[in-house]
Amino acid sequence: MDRAILCLLLAALAACSTSQNPPQQLRKSAELLPSPNATYPSPDGSLYAAIRHSKRPYTVAIIERESGRVLSVAESSASISESGEGMYGTVCATYSEDLSTIVVHEDFSDASPNPRYILFQRRRGTAAYRVSYLAPPSAHTDAPGEFDIIKPRIVRVTNDTITLDYYDGRTRVIHISELLQTRTPKSSEGWPSEAYKRYERNR
């Protein structure tokens, strides 16, 4: 990746937004965590996503603020410092307007980007959410090298689509039903490279 694209990528990792709010959901690299949770609220404040790190594996929980009820729990890829005070990575929670769909995008890799995309979808007739892990399509750059693939960030979510941003001006709207999904916790590098070819065939 050339220097300009790398700078764009680093700048984008320093700011993240929900579907309706200005940038405020990011926990920057090695930022101190609130105890016991790092929280990422919905635009209306009625829900929040929380990185819970009291024991391993660390988890992401969707919590109803007024009652404190836990509506769903997924496995996080969070990396916490040995002191337990620093979280090394980035997290962004993006909510649909009706709160029926939430995507938590986190990246705690210490080398090339290896994000985890966690999808929470409300179960019909209940307040609870079901969980799956996504593999949004990557984008390629013209520059050879280790960083010639861009993993997107999530900039908007509806009840059936997500909008992807590739940091270089390219965006893509894709139906959630078309995304590669699994119930097994998995980050980007855990998906076989052959799986991504499906996206190119279906474009």
Image: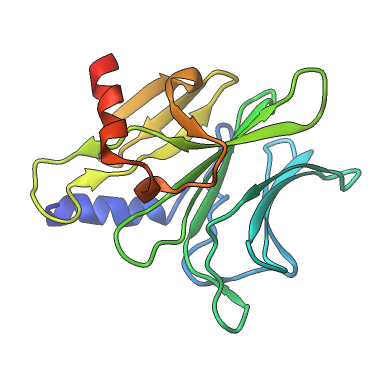
Position of 13 with respect to 186 (left or right) is left
Position of 100 with respect to 9 (left or right) is right
Position of 99 with respect to 109 (left or right) is right
Position of 5 with respect to 143 (left or right) is right
Looking at the picture, the colour scheme in use is: rainbow
The residue under the point 47% across, 63% down is 89
Tell me where residue 81 appears, x and y as whole percent.
54, 77
Closer to the camera in the image, 178 or 28: 178
Q: In which quadrant of the rendered image does the C terminus lie?
A: top left
Q: Can you tell which quarter of the image residue 101 is in?
A: top right
Q: Can you tell which quarter of the image residue 27 is in?
A: bottom right
The residue under the point 48% across, 31% down is 181
Tell me where residue 119 appears, x and y as whole percent.
57, 35
The residue under the point 44% across, 48% down is 187
Tell me where residue 94 appears, x and y as whole percent.
57, 38
Give the vertical position of 79 relative to 14 (above or below). Answer: below
- Point out the residue furthest to the right here: 67
Closer to the camera in the image, 123 or 85: 123
Give the vertical position of 202 relative to 77 (above or below). Answer: above
The residue under the point 67% across, 37% down is 43
Q: Can you tell which quarter of the image residue 135 is in?
A: top left
- Point out the residue furthest to the bottom here: 83
Tell me where residue 49 appears, x and y as whole percent.
68, 47
Can residue 203 be seen at all in this image of the molecule?
A: no
